[in-house]
Amino acid sequence: MRIRWTIPAADDVENIYHYLLNNYPQFAESTVRSIYQQIKKLKMSPNRGRTGHRSGTRELPIPGLPYIVVYAIRPEVIEILHIYHGAQDWR
């Protein structure tokens, strides 16, 4: 399966990177790298995440980090919808 990023999800990861770069620069690159690595694993195992709070979505908590990737499994593609910090009120 392919991974397709939505614009909001790409914006989310960019915002995470810039926030960390400004506030915790030592964690910026490794955090974003971990997010990408976990998302990449969805290609081989798209059902890794839990059932999402919104119909038709799944949620992938990032191990060791406070981020949750919201995604949808479509025919032949995994669509990354958003990436949220666990403390955000996003449901």
Image (cartoon, rainbow, N blue to C red):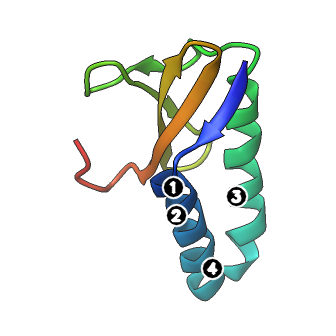
Q: Position of residue 89 (x, y in %)?
A: 22, 52
Residue under label 2: 11
Q: Does residue 43 sit above or below 18 in this rendering? A: above
Q: Position of residue 23 (x, y in %)?
A: 57, 84
Direction from residue 9 to residue 38 in the image, left or right: right
Q: Amino acid at mark 2?
A: Asp
Direction from residue 28 to residue 85 in the image, left or right: left
Q: CA distance from mark 1 to mark 2?
A: 6 Å
Secondary element at tag 3:
helix
Number of the label disc, if any, that sits on residue 7: 1
Q: Does residue 84 sit above or below 69 in this rendering? A: below
Q: Amino acid at mark 4?
A: Tyr
Foreground label between 1 and 4: 1
Q: Position of residue 81 (x, y in %)?
A: 46, 41
Q: Amino acid at mark 3?
A: Val
Residue under label 4: 24
Number of the label disc, if any, that sits on residue 79: none
Q: CA distance from mark 1 to mark 4?
A: 25 Å
- Of mark 2 and mark 4, the one earlier in the sequence is 2
Label 1: how many Cα within 10 Å (few below 14, some 14–19, many 20+): few
Q: CA distance from mark 3 to mark 2?
A: 12 Å
- Of mark 3 and mark 2, the one earlier in the sequence is 2
- Of mark 4 and mark 3, the one earlier in the sequence is 4
Do the numbered discs 1 and 2 sit on residues whose CB atoms are within 8 Å? yes
Residue under label 3: 32
Secondary element at tag 2:
helix
Do the numbered discs 2 and 4 sit on residues whose CB atoms are within 8 Å? no
Label 4: how many Cα within 10 Å (few below 14, some 14–19, many 20+): few
Q: Quadrant of residue 10?
A: bottom right
Foreground label between 1 and 3: 1
Q: CA distance from mark 1 to mark 3?
A: 16 Å
